[in-house]
Amino acid sequence: MAVYQTTVSAPVNIACIKYWGKRDTKLILPTNSSLSVTLDQDHLRSTTTSRADPSFDKDRLWLNGKEESIEAGGRLSTCIVELKRLRAAVEAQNSAAPKLSTFPVYIASRNNFPTAAGLASSASGFAALVASLAALYELPATPSQLSVIARQGSGSACRSLFGGFVAWEMGSAPDGSDSLAIEVAPREHWPDIHALICVVSDDKKGTSSTSGMQRTVETSALLQHRIAQVVPARMDAIKDAILRRDFPAFARITMQDSNQFHAVALDTDPPIFYLNDVSRAIIAVITEYNRAAGAIKAAYTYDAGPNAVIYTPKENVKEIVELLLRYFPQSQPFPDPFGLDVNNEGKLPAGF
Ligand code: DP6
């Protein structure tokens, strides 16, 4: 008897222009467009295996070995139902295609990094889930078309369906059909850019992105200014910087946008604090590093947690790792910081 099973992995992405706010919470339509870099390392990925079998009792999902319930109408169910609907369309076109759309599925997903520590696990997780079912169902869909489905699992997940530099265009259609990810440039366009992930804490974050951003939409006047006056021009400017490989322009916009995202978090009532003292100290170190160089050589950015991501051209990686180790001595030996090759970041262990 045939076995219908696929395994697909998807990477984490880190936004330079942050998504923060929904205009439609059910369809996950954002209040602004966003842009990210998809990391291409092996150790920041979600890997998902999907299997369809007529003997299964119902659709079930395990995350890192623990079963999660699939609530009807919830995010997981929305993605699975939509992918089964697309599979049914394939079956309607081709009577020889096995009726996988009628089989229950078992889905097992694993992250090889801490879940919900501000390291965008929902992004890689939903991207891997959607890509895995799309492969199982042999759907003739482009990454942009799949991004519309992944977006309904977790907004930022839509950007993890592409490598390289990716925009999530907010769109305007009420059904969300044009709120999707597009590739701005592939990774090979600018291989020189590296991401250093500084794990300040791998605790689960205090305020989830979903509830935090909704509170911001409801209470922050600064968010309204950001949406209308700031992000549209920044999206154009950062795309242009990427296409011209202009690191100082890319870095300046990335830092400004991280700062404004944390400002709107603070402008939320009650306020949301994602950065801690170590996060702020890293901002000070990078700011001083750039000032002393008389040029912008590195950019920090922070998502909904205290961990820093530092973007920098390859030539500066060694210097920045040395600098961070001087200011933040490690309790554990640092894993091979100076043998960093093109596709490696220096990952600072937790607890510094
Ligand atoms: C700060 O995509 O996790 O990382 O759509 O509610 O699942 P939901 O939110 P999520 O929010 C990510 C917010 C961010 C910024 C970003 O990745 O653009």
Image (spheres, grey):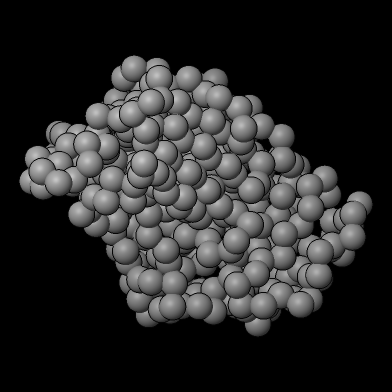
Q: Is residue 335 above or below residue 94?
A: below
Left or right for 19, reference 83 = right
Look at the image and tell me in which quarter the N terminus lies.
Answer: top left
Q: Which of 94 and 118 is in front in this view?
A: 94
Left or right for 180, reference 189 = left
**x, y percentage for residue 309?**
62, 56
Q: Is any atom of residue 235 visible in this view?
A: no
Q: Is residue 250 above or below residue 129?
A: below
**x, y percentage for residue 85?**
20, 34
Q: Which residue lies furthest to the left in this view?
A: 93
Q: Which of 6 and 228 is in front in this view?
A: 6
Which quadrant would residue 204 be assigned to in this image? top right
Q: Is any atom of residue 301 visible in this view?
A: yes
Which quadrant would residue 87 be assigned to in this image? top left
Left or right for 182, reference 48 = left
Which quadrant would residue 126 be assigned to in this image? top left
Residue at screen point 45% across, 26% down: 60
Q: Nearer the viewer, residue 103 or 174?
A: 103
Q: Nearer the viewer, residue 61 or 315?
A: 61
Residue at screen point 66% across, 41% down: 114
Residue at screen point 81% across, 64% down: 335
**x, y percentage for residue 193?**
54, 73
